[in-house]
Amino acid sequence: MTHERKAHFDEVDKSVRNGGLQISTENEDPRILTIFAEELKKQGIPLAPEFARRWEQLSKSPRSGEN
């Protein structure tokens, strides 16, 4: 692996809080999961259990209707 490629992956795998590009679940905009779930549904693909649990939590959250 080249130095440049390693530097790229080091940045991608690092949290945004630590100067990287990875957005943790708790910091992700809830609209992202909505878009993801809707696209899967269009393709007839079920939402994986771990995402379904998050989806259920988001739908019960008072923030879920925010724009």
Image (spheres, rainbow, N blue to C red):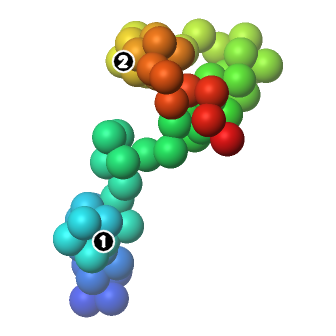
Mark 2: few/some/many CA within 10 Å (<14, 14-19, 20+):
few
Looking at the rendered structure, the number of numbered marks drawn on it comes to: 2
Residue type at tag 2: Glu
Q: CA distance from mark 2 to mark 1?
A: 24 Å
Question: In the image, is 1 to the left or to the right of 46?
Answer: left
Mark 1: few/some/many CA within 10 Å (<14, 14-19, 20+):
some
- Residue 60, percent across and down? 47, 12
**The C terminus sits in image quarter:** top right
Which of the numbered marks, if any, corresponds to residue 20?
Answer: 1
Which of the numbered marks, if any, corresponds to residue 50?
Answer: 2
Residue placed farthest to the bottom in the image? Answer: 3
Residue placed farthest to the left in the image? Answer: 18
Which of the numbered marks, if any, corresponds to residue 39?
Answer: none
| Placement of 30 over or under 40, stated as above or below | below
Q: Earlier in the sequence, mark 2 or mark 1?
A: 1
Q: Nearer the viewer, residue 66 or 57?
A: 66
Q: Nearer the viewer, residue 4 or 16?
A: 16
